[in-house]
Amino acid sequence: MKLVVAKRALRQNEINCLVKELWRLPHVGFINKRLWQTFKHIYVATHDGNFVGVCVVFPLKQWTKLGPLVICQKYQGKGFGKALLTHVVQNMDQRNLFIGSSNPKVCNIAEDLGFKKETSFFCVPSEIQRYLLSYIFTRFSFQYLLDAMKKKLRSGHWKYYYFLKRNQ
């Protein structure tokens, strides 16, 4: 497995692929084309020149959010998600990191990478709480709510976890 990871903007065909993939993925909320284009810190994974997936990074003051992490369906279960997230974590030297997810695979990877699991929004630092509330209010729409409900009902995963990794 030779995964190549580059920090760069997404290409239009990659955005189109991600939007199509998100309809199938039960653990990632819908992100439209316009929103993908606004992300500034993106790690793009390819294998043999083919688009595999992406991890978006949001630097805050004291913390950095990792995700969304999206691996295209045909590459899932092959270790690419773990390899991509490991690469991103290793490139976030001296940063406090957090991941939020209901995806059991992402949860397992985060724990393997030494992140500490928190089960309550109220147990995470206030900077993360403010970011998450801002994220919900700025991206909230009827389409987002409808998609979230469909995905939750389809997947049966209602629990959302937070994973924190403080720099040493």
Image (cartoon, helix red, strand yellow):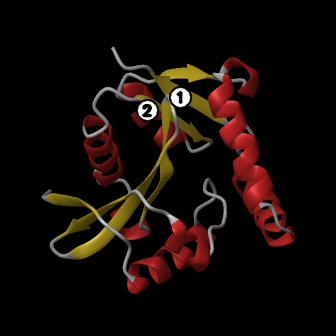
Quarter of the image for the C terminus: give it. top left
In the image, is 141 to the left or to the right of 51?
A: right
Residue 4 in the image: x percent, y percent?
18, 60
Disc 2 secondary structure class = helix
Cα distance between the residues tagged 2 and 1 = 7 Å
In the image, is 134 to the left or to the right of 68?
A: right
Quarter of the image for the N terminus: give it. bottom left
Disc 1 secondary structure class = strand
Residue indicated by mark 2: 110
Q: Residues within 10 Å of mark 2 (few under 14, many from 20)?
A: many
Q: Is 131 in front, or is 151?
A: 131
Residue 61 in the image: x percent, y percent?
51, 34
Res 128 seen here = yes
* Image marks 2 and 1: residues in contact by CB distance under 8 Å: yes
Mark seen at residue 163: 1
Residue 22 in the image: x percent, y percent?
57, 68
Q: Amino acid at mark 2?
A: Ala
At horizontal 72% and vertical 24% (from top left) the residue drawn is: 120
